[in-house]
Image (spheres, rainbow, N blue to C red):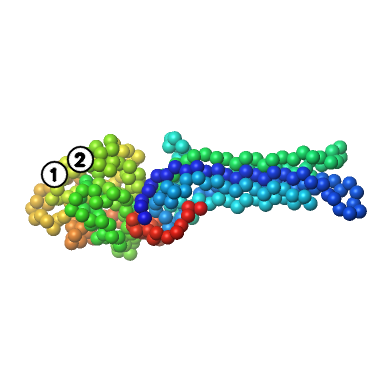
Amino acid sequence: MHFLDQAKIFIKSGAGGPGAVSFRREKYIEMGGPDGGDGGRGADVVFEAVPALNTLIDFRYSQHFKAPRGAHGMGKDRTGASAKPLVIKVPVGTQILSEDKEEILADLTEEGERMVFLEGGLGGRGNASYKSSTNRAPRQHQPGEPGEEMWVWLRLKLLADVGLVGLPNAGKSTFLNAVANTKAKVGAYAFTTIAPKLGVVRHKGREFVLADIPGLIEGAADGKGIGDRFLGHIERCRVLIHLIDIEGEDPKEALKTVEEELAAYGEGLEDKPRLVALNKLDLVDEELFEAFADELKAEGVQEVFPISGATGDGIPEMLDAVLRYLPEKKTGAPGSADVDEVDDEDWSPI
């Protein structure tokens, strides 16, 4: 299944049903009077956050959602049935934005959270409701109120406790595979990761969700490489792990490049706690690590973790540090599936 984190859809709530114009006609009953019932209420448009989803791909193919209208009133004072709500299922962490993307209208961050987004129209009055002492045979009635309609943007921000950042080919996918039950693609070239991936990490009786996003390069905020569009998926993280390839470019420059892109993106990412790790320790000697670690500490990094995603060296110590930034107990995880490995079942967003 492909990953999609933005979609534009049209939604419309149901109109109310019209009231009825009817008169009682029964044998041996003279001047039975009006008995037209009211119309039913139109259907609401409801958004529901469900845990089984972590992509908006279904909304690429279904973009118009129109709720049914209420049933019309009938004779014998029968009120029309109200229409059932139209429930649109979205992943946990979905934001609903205005058409111009300037306003956040809703933010669904809890599993099972439901929100009535557009209310259905009220049903119209039947002629029985107009009866009075001076108006014994009214023929007026009301049509149902129209429903509400609008275009909105859906934007998904994956819920994760910890985010992985770094330059392309820093070993983020290898690290994710080493600490979580995932099968992220790994390759000896840049941008093997082209969409965010999630994994659940279990360490010392605790568990947390780790998010891996595509690598950042200089100018990502201006659209270079894959750009910074996926940084929104780590906005909710409590702590960031910055992986630096000890065999790649100058670690000091790598640190500077990523930090500048995070600051350019904003949204509080520059203020989040960081854990800096020099990765691929198995390919260099300890002396080189110490030299690079001293350079990073000179740039203000308090602690540098030596790790190897390939061999697992240093990873337990890194995870110990992560736990310091998380709540004491976490009873559940927002999600554990790799977004590229969600079961491709027949599913509809409604």
Report the label total.
Answer: 2
On the image, numbered disc 1 is attached to which residue? 250
Residue type highlighted by circle 1: Asp
Give me the residue at 44% from left, 42% from top: 8
Q: Which residue is mark 2?
A: 256
Tell me which residue sits at (21%, 48%) in the image: 190
Query: In the depicted view, which residue is nearer to us: 106 or 162?
Result: 106
Q: Which mark is residue 124?
A: none
Q: Position of residue 188 (x, y in %)?
A: 18, 53
At a point 44% along the width and 35% down the height, the residue shown is 100
Q: Secondary structure at mark 1?
A: loop
* 201 shown above or below 131: below
The quarter of the rendered structure image containing the N terminus is: bottom left
Residue 99 in the image: state x and y as whole percent.
Answer: 46, 37
Q: In the image, is 134 to the left or to the right of 164?
A: right
Q: Position of residue 131 (x, y in %)?
A: 82, 42
Q: Position of residue 315 (x, y in %)?
A: 22, 59
